[in-house]
Image (tube, helix red, strand yellow):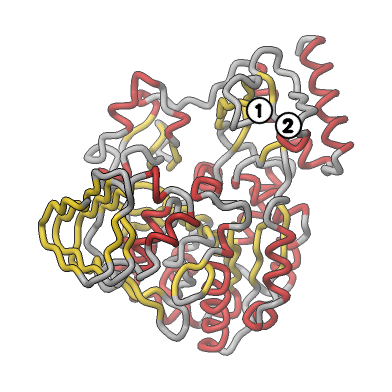
Amino acid sequence: MTEPEAARRARIAALMRQAGLGERVIAQFDAAYTDLCHGADGLIPESAIEPVAGLTAHAELARHRAAGAALAGRVAQLKLNGGLGTSMGLDGPKSLLEARASLSFLEVALRQHNAYAAAHHTAPALALLNSFSTDADTRAALARSDAGRRAAPTLLLQTMAPKIRCDTLEPVEWPDDPALAWCPPGHGEVFLVLAVSGWLDRLIDGGYRYLMLSNIDNLGATIDPAIVGYMADQQIPFLMEVARRTEQDRKGGHLARGRDGGLLLREVAQCPADDLATFQDIARHRYFNTNTIWVDLIAVRDVLARHGGVLRLPLIRNRKTVDPRRADSPAVYQLETAMGAAIAQFPGATAVVVDRERFVPVKVCADLLALRSDRYALDAAGHLVVHSAAPISITLDPRYYQQIDAFDQRFAGGAPSLIACHRLTVEGDVWFDAPVTCRGDVTIRNRGATAVHLTDHHSWHDSVVELG
């Protein structure tokens, strides 16, 4: 280690201590920073991996359902709740956005959890992994929620990491807004948070053995006794739910095998530019991570112990500007890790191929439109009922539908009927003030300078509709 590197590491550690971060958190960041200083870029070339084949399908696990149901009291779940949904124009937790039927994502998740507890006559543990940006609002929402009081979730808090200047490898300073000098370290830190918060030991001491981790905006991710039973019967320490990639998933991360035969996860930020075409080849790399992960808690404790309490996951080096709204602000590295990348740390880890009904994420307003449409419904237990599993592609003009407030205004008449639609494109400013039915491939286009309001019911099938 050079003297300048040692000095930088010492300054970063002091900065993190000043921010109230613990020694194991500092040690984990120091490991990533050391990799950065030694030239690690986190890239995984195509020559280092092989495609994955022969995975077990979710439907094949039905015979394990009874065994999993008998373990209902030993299953806990954790929801990742750190996102603000800034890509949708939100300035608060995405989990508080209305998902369906006047229920937020948080309320639906709580309803699902409470229904599972009632059905299995148990009181499973639930945790929310909040960020500094979502913690206060989430606490306030839970205090107002009957479902939240019944679920009584444990609230865990993400840590934070300093952004690193690309030119000097020093922690960036940004007096205009000091908070922008820090960033989330990625959801790969969840295993560290489980340990340092004490929740991991409390779960094990309380008789829990399995933990399901998932994104709170994925309403399809619910506790499945068949998966629990499969893990118990086969003694699986780590299981990832994956789905078949489609053309819409070409830019998302994929599962692969390393040269040692073990499974690993490769994100697009870890793909060399020369390998991008192969990365996006969905016939070669067929499965993507849904970010629903199941772990054996004893295995997590053992893996952490073997690694000195710090799980070193593959580095994701994201190059940004310190102020994302100012392209002229200093270039920085955000050092992150992905939760799913831990699959490579657990001998015997596996993946199960699930249908899209277990993966219904909401990242942009177009996803929310599909979720609110008649393609889905919620049953009394808060479970998502899929009325159409056929893939749909929705493209909404970003000038008018990218921000949630503008989106909600333009769909005041409710989401269109999309149950028989496979492609919907809206170009221009169109207000859906009355019910609309779309089937097949429908393009609705307003080339005019003023908005067009649809105040009567319309039904279109394989049509290009010119308005204005």
Q: Residues within 10 Å of mark 1 (few under 14, many from 20)?
A: many
Relative to 26, residue 173 above or below: above
Q: Position of residue 290 (x, y in %)?
A: 42, 53
Few, some or many residues within 10 Å of mark 2 (<14, 14–19, 20+): many
Q: Position of residue 415 (x, y in %)?
A: 33, 67
- Which element is circle 2 on? helix
Relative image position of residue 40 (x, y in whole percent): 58, 21
Q: Looking at the picture, which amino acid does disc 1 mark?
A: Val
- At 74% from the left and 70% from the top, the residue drawn is 205
> Relative to 258, does residue 120 appear above or below in the rendering?
below
Q: Residue at x 10, y 57 (%)?
A: 462
* Residue 225 left/right relative to 126: left
**Residue at (64, 17) in percent of width and height:** 166
The residue that mark 2 highlights is 181
Q: Nearer the viewer, residue 92 or 131?
A: 92
Which residue does the numbered mark 1 point to in the structure image?
Answer: 322
| SS for callout 1 | loop
Q: Is residue 254 left or right of residue 303?
A: left
From the image, which quarter does the N terminus lie in? top right
Q: Can the viewer see residue 274?
A: yes
Q: Determine the residue positioned at 79% across, 42% down.
A: 24
Could you tell me residue 113's position as x and y percent?
A: 56, 77
